[in-house]
Amino acid sequence: MSLYLLRRFLGFAITLVVAAAAVFFLLDRLPGDPAQFILGINASPDAVASLRNQLGLDLPLWQRFTDWLLAMFRGDFGVSYTQSAPVAALIGERLWVTLPLAGFAMVLSMAIGLPIGILAARRRGSWLDTGLMLLAQMGIAVPNFWFGMLLVLLFSITLRWLPPGGFTPWQEDFWAALRAMVLPSLALALPQAAILARVMRTALVDVQNADFIRTARAKGMTLGEAVWRHGVRNALLPILTILGLQFAFLISGTVVVENVFYLPGLGRLIFTAISERDLILVRGAVIILIAAVTASMFIVDVLYAVVDPRLRGGLQP
């Protein structure tokens, strides 16, 4: 394995361990006793103590963290306090909603934002450029849950084209599940598309003044041809960075959007687990989200080397 990939992978592993420690210790400091919450306020002290012993809550903090971390690396995330089911199974069921939701939102944000950014850069200084950037600024300012409510009002209540919420499992009705994903995916994608449009426009405007663009135009290319053939590739580096960060925002945004649209995803699972003081379920779900975000940044680092020839030496064996 190349030194470049090895360094990135080590950074990925260290980030996961540090994040796991932060999540574990911060959640452990939350007020309240999970055993007391499960049994109710009228439970006897002996019953609470017995349940704490059964759940391993009476062990030293460092031992509980070590046992949890080692078990997690083996794929054992423990058993939910409130649902009495393996945490890994509960998370696996919800990932079939959250990951497609984030993936569809990412595709939509690129399909909307990148063409708008390219068009605005090619019409720099025109009324079209000003109008598109004004819309992008409005898209950044409006939160995704507000977009979600507006989309429900338009497409579900007024036009009755799409369902306002709920979810049919993929294996039961694929097309119904896909239709249920449209509005929440669009609600997540619109603010991110606005950011992509502004970044793409800025990157292309900077590239248009580069020497290689002037050389391409001197060889007979129009500005549009030179930008499309040579400028877009050089503008991809900041776009890749933004895409990696956007995946993190999309994953975290599902916590709110899934509750707006009543989707049974990982976001709603975390929300329910927090309200029920099911700390072991919260830890497992949050670690999965952190792993997904960190993995996306690792992929972005690799794509950097693919796009930028100056980094390719680090990929050689």
Image (spheres, rainbow, N blue to C red):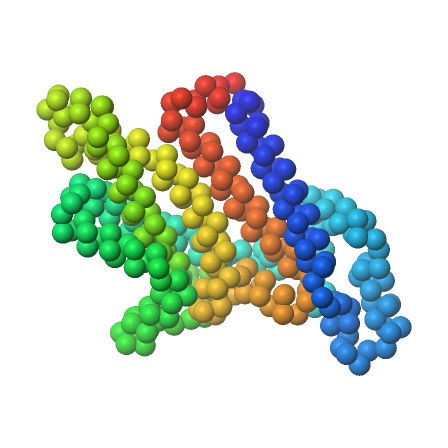
Identity of the residue furthest to the right in this view: 46
Identity of the residue furthest to the left in this view: 220
- Pinpoint residue 250: horizontal percent, then vertical percent: 45, 54
- Pinpoint residue 131: horizontal percent, then vertical percent: 19, 55
Q: Nearer the viewer, residue 226 or 166?
A: 226
Q: Residue at x 41, y 39 (%)?
A: 241
Q: Is residue 176 left or right of residue 259?
A: left
Q: Nearer the viewer, residue 126 or 110?
A: 126
Residue 178 visible in the current orientation: no
Q: Residue at x 32, y 52 (%)?
A: 194
- Pinpoint residue 9: horizontal percent, then vertical percent: 57, 32
Residue 130 visible in the current orientation: yes
- Pinpoint residue 315: horizontal percent, then vertical percent: 48, 23
Q: Residue at x 77, y 46 (%)?
A: 66
Q: Name above or below for residue 247 compared with residue 238.
A: below
Q: Nearer the viewer, residue 159 or 305?
A: 305
Q: Is residue 13 left or right of residue 133?
A: right
Q: Name above or below for residue 288 compared with residue 7.
A: below
Q: Nearer the viewer, residue 149 or 127?
A: 127
Q: Name above or below for residue 60 compared with residue 152.
A: above
Name the image quarter holding the N terminus: top right
Q: Is residue 135 left or right of residue 245?
A: left
Q: Is residue 25 left or right of residue 98?
A: right
The number of numbered badges drawn on the structure is 0
Q: Residue at x 45, y 45 (%)?
A: 245
Q: Quadrant of residue 70?
A: top right
